[in-house]
Amino acid sequence: MDRIHFISLFLPAMLALVPAYCETPAKISSILDYALSHSPEYRQQEIGHRVSQFQIDLSYYAYKPRLTISGDDSLNRSLSIAETLTDGLSLSYEKSEQLNTINSKSNTLTLSSDILSSLTDYKKRILDLQREEEMISFTKSRESFKLKVINSAFGLVQEKKNLAVQMESQDQWKNNYEYYKAKFELGSINKISLLNAEVNYLDQENSVDQSKKSLDDAIDQFKILIGYPLSDTLEINQELTAEAYDWVNIPMNPSFDVRLSDLSLDQKKLQLKSARNDLPGDLSMTSTFQSGNSRTFSGSLSYSFYLGEQKNAVSYKDADLSVEREELSNQEKKQNSESERREIVRRYETLKRSLEVSKKRLESASENQEYARIAIQKGLISSLDLQDAQQKLTSAQVELLNAIISYNKLKYEIINTFGGII
């Protein structure tokens, strides 16, 4: 597969822009390990995978030796061992004896073959592909679950840091309210200005309460997702970074969907070849060697076919059309996969620019808010100007936080999109 060339991958470090309220005790890598061991959702996936594997293994048992031992009250005893060597080729051995009869021992060895089927062994080859398909399907589900846990974990980090932003803003509104209250008591402002400052402070208190509830709800849902006790304390300590991704070390494999589609197409082609084998008729051979009182050998070769209408013509036509249908589906999945990769690269470039804009916006909003805080005390601006400056600062802090969170999550989405293992 051609490697996509990426341009302008390096972003300036923006960790200094993240407020200092991002400290928690457990990293996402540890959370992932815990989730894979305790999550009910993942455990269900794992059980489903084991059931599917067992079903495929049962099909392989048809190629293992089968042993039969029998006896009855007439002193007849027999031992039979049979094995399917390949599709259409089987070998069996039978030993029998009547205990109260002299020279009643008999040994029979038989080799039977549907020649066309035994030469190709298509059914067993299809089983091999099905086993590989099941393993890739499970890997895809596991990686999707890991991505879900990662996104949820970053969501918690985002909720917690957003709460810190709202609480910081609340402190500012409280200080403003106290300042206006003091001015009102001195008679330098009217009642409306004081009430307006109080409403702003109460509004921000409500925002803090809503953020706390949102964080608590998210923590509960995350605990359920990873199988963590609801009564136990859980925090996440994951450093946020805006450093450029090391694209060279991200494996660029075919996506899971494309790999599954390729395997499905290979199976359809083998099924078509198997159906083509059955079209002309059956070419069979049986050879038997028997020893006991005397030794005998027998063999037969037969060919049966249909005149007029070919045998299994409908099955062959269905297999032929299934290959054509699967080829179209395979082509579509490859196009979709390529489109998803192009889209995520564009998303990376867009997010990189958004980080730069958010950084500049926060710098401007911080400077503007500091100027407004001083200017209001000198009577240079109105309370509405101060309110606007504080709202812009809070909005800029949240915007940068969201951009950095998205940037950190995107790395794992890229690995998943390019068929890698998180």
Image (tube, grey):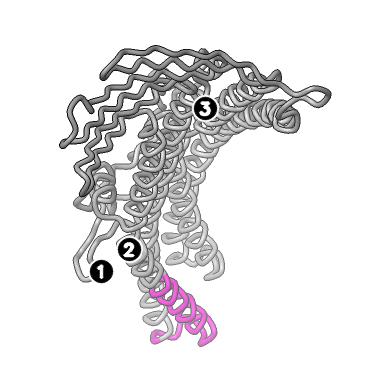
Kindly indicate the quadrant of the structure image that contains residue 143: top left
Indicate which disc, 2 or 3, sits on the residue closer to the N terminus. 2
Q: Which residue is mark 2?
A: 224
Indicate which disc, 1 or 2, sits on the residue closer to the N terminus. 2
Quarter in which the N terminus is drawn: top right
Q: Amino acid at mark 3?
A: Arg
Q: CA distance from mark 1 to mark 2?
A: 7 Å
Q: CA distance from mark 2 to mark 3?
A: 32 Å
Magenta segment includes 50: no
**In the foreground, 397 or 135:** 135
Q: Is residue 344 left or right of residue 176?
A: right
Magenta segment includes 197: yes
Q: Nearer the viewer, mark 2 or mark 3?
A: 3
Q: Which residue is mark 3?
A: 259
Q: Position of residue 237 (x, y in %)?
A: 24, 49
Q: Could you tell me if residue 143 is visible in this image?
A: yes
From the image, give the main secondary structure of the stretch colored magenta: helix
